[in-house]
Image: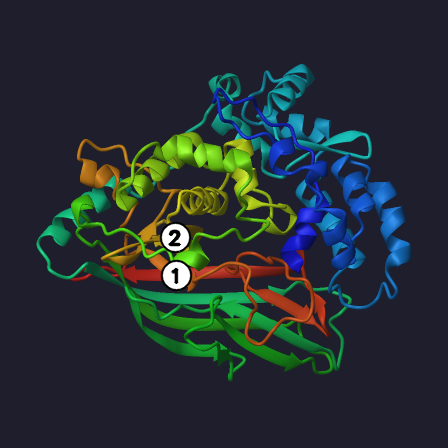
Amino acid sequence: MAVSVALLAGRQFCYPQQPHAQRLTRAAVRPDLGCPGEDEAIATNFDAHAARLMSAGKFIEAEQLLKPRITDPNAPIIGGPAVQLEVLRRTRLDFPLTSEQVLAEIKKSAPDATQEDVDRWREAGDLQSRLIDGEPRYFTRAVSNLFRFNADARRRQVNHEAAEKFNVPALVEKLVKLSEQSDNPQVYPVKHHVKYEVAVKAGNRLVKPGAKVRAWLPFPQEYRQQHDVKLVSSSPPGGQVAPKDTPQRSIYFEQTIADAAPPPRFAVEFEFVTAAYCPQLDPAKAKPYDVTSAVYREFTAERRPHIMFTPEVLRLSQEIVGDERNPLEKARRIFRWVSKNIPWCAELEYSIIPSLSVEGLTARRGDCGVQGTSFITLCRAAGLPARWQSGWQTKPGDWNMHDWSEIYIEPWGWLPVDASNGVQNHADPRVRDFYCGHLDPYRLIVNLDYGRELEPPKTSFRSEPTDFQRGEIEIDGHNLYFNEWSWKFDVETTPPGEPKE
C-alpha cells in the first residue's frame, strides 16, 4: 500500500541526456506522469488528479485538493489522500534550497560560481532540482552530487581533498586468495559488536504523559554467512526480537510516557559474526533453470512499482545479455553494465521515489538501493531469479547503510551481488568481478527483502516503507519522520586473529 502511494506522488526532475541508444525515457516507463491507471487510483482511494498536480510542481493546488478529502486530519496517516499529502510534505523537506541558498553552498567549494552557472548546471541535470509552486527548489545533497558528476564544477573546486577510504580491492584480493585455499565458501569471519540507539528530539508535541511510544530498531538476521547472533542488552529492557524468518528483522520496544519523563530513547547492543562468502564459481558448472519451480516463478516476476518490465526494460535487458545463455555469464554482463552505466550518487528518501528501478534506468545514477533494484529488474527481465538484501556495511572507518542483491544460480543457490561496489579496478578478473557472486565480511544483514511488514506491524505510514535500516518510531499511532528523531550507530569489528578495528 505505502509503495503504491509513493508511485502516485509523481515527480519532475532535471536529468542529463545519456548517450545510450536504449536509454529509457521517463514517459515510456511511467506513463501519465507517473500515475497508475484510473482503476488503480480508484481501488487504492488515491487521487490521480492530485498526483498530476504534484508531478507538475503545483504543490499548493494539490494540497488544496487533498486536504478536504481527509476525514480526520489529526488521525494517524495510514492511507489514501493523507499519505499523498505526507509524501508531498516529505518532498518539500528533501528539496528545501532556493537558488540563492544552493549558490551560496556551491561557493564554499567553487568561489567563482555564479547564478548563471547554477542555471546551466540545473538544465544539464547535474544540479538536482524540481519545480515547486513556480520556483526551482534544490535537493539537500544536490551540491555534493554536482561535484561528482559535473566536470566543470569539479575543476573549479578549491582546497578539495578526497577523503581516505577503506582499500576494498586489497581486501578482495586477500579474500580471493583465502577462498582458493579453503573448501568452505565462508572465509575470513569478522566479529561485530554493535550499539545502536534512537532518541526522539525534545519538544515533540506528541510526547506527553500517558502517550504510547512504539519503536522498531534494526537487528541482525541469522543467514548463512552471518551467525552467532547475540542480544547483549536493550534499553529499556524487554525488547522483543522478531523471529528468524522475518524479512525485515527488528527489535521492538513499547513504552508509556510517564509524567515529566525525558524524550523517549531506545537502544540495543548486539554481537554477530559475518564471514566473507566466496564460493568457487565456474560458468561450465552452471545449470539451466527449472522454469516451473517456485523460486524461478517468484523471483523472475515483476513486483511493481519498484520492479517493472516495460517494453524498453525488456529491450535493454536483451541488449545487455545478447545471445548469452549461461546464467552466470548473463548475470556478469548485467553486473558490469550497471557498474559502468549507473554510478553512485546521494539519493532522495525512498518514500518519495515512485520506483527505484525507474530512477536508476532513467537518471542513470543512484545510490546503492537504486543500483541494486536496477540490477534485480534487469536480471528478472532476462530470466535470472534475483532479490533484495540490505542492512549496513561495516568497513573500518567507512560504515554506512547499504543495499545489495542476490541471484539464484544452480548448483550454488543464492549468490550475493553488490552492484554498488561494482567492478573493481584491478588487473585480476577474479578481483574485478568479485562482487558478482561473492561478498565481503563487513556487513550487517538486516533485510532479506524490501517493503515487508514489520513485526509487530506498524500502524502508520512508515518513514521508510521500502528499506529498514535506521528504524521506525510512532507515538499513539502517529509516525515520527526522520527529522523528528536522531540515531547513532557504533560498530567494532574484529577480523580473525587481529585486534578490534
For the point 24% across and 57% down, which residue is it? Answer: 412
- Based on the displayed image, in which of its 4 quarters is residue 344 positioned? top left
In the image, what residue type sits under mark 1?
Answer: Val
In the image, what residue type sits under mark 2?
Answer: Pro
Above or below: residue 443 compared with residue 380: below
Above or below: residue 101 compared with residue 301: above
Which quadrant does the C terminus fall into? bottom left
Above or below: residue 501 compared with residue 334: below
For the point 27% across and 51% down, which residue is it? Answer: 288
Residues 404 and 117: in front is 404
Could you tell me if residue 499 is visible in this image?
Answer: no
Q: From the top left corner, tell me how far across and down residue 200 is, in percent.
A: 64, 66
Q: List the single residue furthest toward the front.
A: 292
Could you tell me if residue 328 is visible in this image?
Answer: yes
Is the Cβ of the residue at disc 1 closer than 8 Å to that at disc 2?
Answer: yes
Q: Name the residue under label 2.
A: 385
Secondary structure of the residue carrying tag 2 is: loop
The disc at residue 295 is: 1
Residues 103 and 178: in front is 178
